[in-house]
Amino acid sequence: MHPDVLDAGREALARAVQSGLLIDGHASHCGDDLFLIMSHDRGEDDEAVHRLAWETFVVGTDVAKRLHLYGAGQDLLVDAFPGNVQGAGPGSVELGLEERPSEPVVVFMAGGTAAGVFNLPLYKMFADPFNTAGLVIAEPMHDGFSFEVHDVRASKKIMLATPAESYDLLSFIGSPSRYAVKRVVTRNGEVVAASSTDKISLIAGRHAGNDDPAAIVRCQGDFPVVGEVLEPFATAWTVEGAMRGSHYGPLMPVALDQAQPSRFSGPPRVVALGFQLAEGKLVGPRDMFDDSSFDNARSEANQVADYLRKHGPFEPHRLPLDEAESPAMPGVAAKLASRWADLG
């Protein structure tokens, strides 16, 4: 992320706060992607807020093009603002809430990976008692949570409640290339977490870069505490992404100053910014993975990356052909189709 692109994002958000469109805003990044964290009181899917995001990405693209940066604007799949950034290329996640007396939130930003990357961490946060002790010992959490799961290929959604439907839930979200957790809600319908599920390759119909998803998780009180929310990332889970979006790699939790995937466009990175909401103001951020207790996860990620890279173009390092975003295979298959002969 070039500093000039990041500055363009910061300036756009500052103007929006000054005009009253936003309560607060924070521009950040993971890898080479700009993330806009915005708070406002206009409700979800507000056109003016989505327009602000779109126009900020356009300005950032213009800066990147002047600097001759590679792939500038490749996530912007349409020429003009379509009324909502969802389905237009950039990943987006919104979480509407009524602010509690104390409202800590953690914003996760991932780079070099794909939508669905938060399936396993969200399951562990809200459904795994070996990760989240509060599911056992905290009365408000003892009844469990419900997961809104999206089938990103069929454009359908389903709600599944844990712990009663945990096995059903895992049947779907264990395949993150197709099924992604969109929201986690309490028994009374209060949204406690949300993630972006936009898959840019499905929108574009071709490889157009990694999805670079994000997630927002509310913490403390009747929800998992901050330590329980961060704990899933103490393991370097294997995720889609890395080079050309067509490989598996370990998800490495890193501080912002290490969020620069370079080796084979990886390993895929995730950063976590902690904020305290105060009447909509974003107090912070705290760089949550800037912590030596995640050193083992980073070491594990490097070891897994070494192992997977030795496979080269073979699975399980390369994605299966029906999931890989690389456009080469259809052309190779067509060129050699006439040379295939029947067996026997």
Image (cartoon, helix red, strand yellow):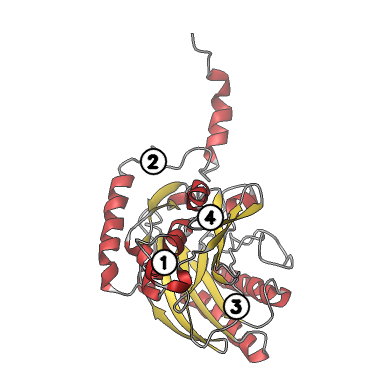
Label 3, residues with CA under 10 Å away: few <14, some 14-19, many ≥20 = few
In the image, which is nearer the foreground, mark 2 or mark 1? 1
CB under 8 Å between callouts 2 and 1?
A: no
Q: Is residue 1 visible?
A: no
Which tag, 3 or 1, sits closer to the chain's start? Answer: 3
Which tag, 4 or 2, sits closer to the chain's start? Answer: 4
> For residue 336, which quarter of the picture?
top right
CB under 8 Å between callouts 3 and 1?
A: no
Which tag, 3 or 4, sits closer to the chain's start? Answer: 3
Residue 134 picture location, percent across and down: 39, 70
Residue placed under numbered mark 4 in the picture: 209
Residue placed under numbered mark 2 in the picture: 316
Cα–Cα gap, marks 4 and 2: 20 Å
Residue 254 picture location, percent across and down: 35, 68
Residue 193 picture location, percent across and down: 53, 68
Label 1, residues with CA under 10 Å away: few <14, some 14-19, many ≥20 = many
* Residue type at numbered disc 4: Gly
Residue placed under numbered mark 1 in the picture: 135
